Amino acid sequence: MVWPPRDDLWTEFGFGTRCIHAGQPAEPTTGAIMTPIYQTSTFTQEGVGGHKGYEYARTGNPTRTALEICLASLEGARHGVCFASGSAATANVMHTLRPGDHVVSSDDVYGGTYRQFTTIFAPLGVEFSFVDMTDHDAVRAACRPGTTKILWVETPTNPLLKVVDIAAMATIARDVGARCFVDNTFATPALQQPMGLGAHAVVHSTTKYIGGHSDVVGGVVVTSDDALADDLFRLQNSIGATPGPQDCFLQLRGLKTLHLRMERHCNSARALAAWLSDHPQVASVIYPGLESHPQHAVASKQMSDFGGMVSFELKGSLERANRFVATTKVFALAESLGGVESLIEVPASMTHASVPPHVREQIGIADGLIRLSVGIEDLDDLKADLTCAFEN
Ligand SMILES: *Cc1c(COP(=O)(O)O)cnc(C)c1O
C-alpha cells in the first residue's frame, strides 16, 4: 500500500495531461490538489511493521513517489527512480556493474559523466570504451559480447549537438546482450522517447529542462525492466543519494509546463539558428533542425522537434568570443541549461575548459564556439540582445 499508487501512470492520456496529472492524485485525507511536500524523515507505525508504505524518508517519501511516477509516465516506462542529481543517477546505474564489466559510451558525453566514468568507476575495474556513436560499425567493433553490459548513449550531445541513432544503438545492445541507456537530458521526453525506440532505460539530469526553472538539482532513471528497477531502488536506498521532498516538489511543479516550455524553447531556437546562419560574423551554426546538420535525418526520425540548444562559431579569436558573451543582457553568462531564462557560454573557456586545447580541436570545439540555451523570453528581445553583442 503506497500512496500515490505506483501504477497511476495515466498511460491512456496525452503527454501534456500526463505532465500535469500522472502520479499526482488529490491527497486523500484533505483533498489537496497539489502533492504535499512531505517534510519528514520518518513515518509512524501503528504496530511493529504496521506502516502505510513508508518507514524512513531515504527509503521512500510520497512527494518523491509522485515525481518518480510522473517521470516514468512521461518516458513511457513503468518505473522511475529519482536521485539527488543527474550525476547521482548515472553513478547508481554504474553501481549495477562489477569489476571486469564493460561499457561502450558516446565519446562526447557530458563532461561530468566522462569524469565519473574515467576517475571513479574505471579505477574500480569497470572498463570503458569511448566511441563516436554516429559510426555504427565502430560501436559494434567496440562491443565485447558477454562482457559489455551497457551502451551509454547521449543525444543530442553537448555542445556540438551530435545526434545518435537510438534505435540502432538499442539493436546493437540487444545483439551483444547489453542494455542501452540513453541520457535524454537535452531532448526531454517532450521531444524524444528512447524507450519507444528500444532503449532499456533513460537517464536525466532533471536539473535542466525537467525542473526548467534553474532552481533545483536532480536526476532520474526510468525503465520498464522490473529486475533493473528493483536493483536501482535497492541502490537508491543503500547509497542514499536521494532528493529531498522540496526538490521533488519543485520538479513536479516544473513538469506541469514541460510541454509548453519545450514548444517555445524549440520555436525560438529554430528561429535563432536560421537567423544566425545568415549573419556575416558567424562561421557556422549547429542545430539539429537545420538541414546542414550532419545528422539532421536521424534527428527528424527520432525527435518530434529539435530542442532549445544552439551552438555557433563566431569568426575571430577566443577573446572575441569571451567579449561577445560578456556583453549580452537578456542572455545570462552562465553554465547549465534548460531553464526559462536564456543562457550563453563559451565552451572553450567555461564548460569544456578542462579539455586540453588539442583534444578540443580534434572533437570540433572551436575557440569561437558559443553555446546558447534559448529561453522562453520574447524572441525579438533575444535577437536584439545578440545584435548588440555582434555590434560591440
Ligand atoms: C547536467 C547534465 C548531467 C549531470 O547532471 P547533474 O544534475 O548536474 O548532476 C548529465 N548529463 C547531461 C546531458 C547534463 O546536461
Image (cartoon, rainbow, N blue to C red):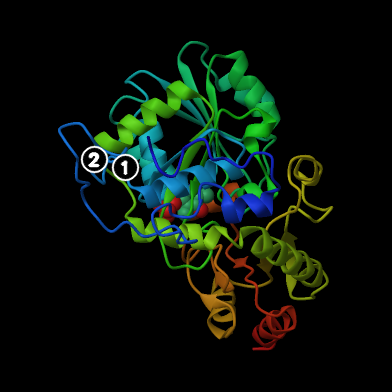
Query: Which element is circle 1 on?
Result: loop
Q: Residue at x 59, y 73 (%)?
A: 342
Q: Left or right: where does residue 303 sit relative to residue 7?
A: right
- x and y percentages locating residue 72 in the rendered image: 54, 40
Between the C-alphas of marks 2 and 1, the distance is: 7 Å
* Image quadrant where residue 122 sits: top left
Q: Looking at the image, is 313 positioned above or below residue 219?
A: below
Which circle marks residue 144 in the picture? none
Marks 2 & 1, CB-CB < 8 Å contact: yes
Q: Left or right: where does residue 86 sit relative to residue 368?
A: left
> What count of labels does the image hold?
2
Q: For label 1, count other residues whose C-alpha is less than 10 Å away and answer few (under 14), some (14-19) or many (20+).
A: some
Which circle marks residue 55 in the picture? 2
Q: Earlier in the sequence, mark 2 or mark 1?
A: 2
Query: Which element is circle 2 on?
Result: loop
- x and y percentages locating residue 244 in the rendered image: 32, 55
Q: Residue at x 57, y 74 (%)?
A: 341
Residue 137 shows in the view: yes
- x and y percentages locating residue 84 in the rendered image: 35, 50
Q: Nearer the viewer, residue 213 or 379?
A: 213
Q: Left or right: where does residue 175 sit relative to residue 181?
A: right
Which circle marks residue 60 in the picture? 1
Q: Tell us which disc is closer to us: 2 or 1.
A: 2
Q: Left or right: where does residue 85 sit relative to residue 352?
A: left
Residue type at mark 2 is: Glu
Q: Looking at the image, is 150 positioned above or below residue 349?
A: above
Residue type at mark 1 is: Gly
Q: For label 2, count other residues whose C-alpha is less than 10 Å away and answer few (under 14), some (14-19) or many (20+).
A: some
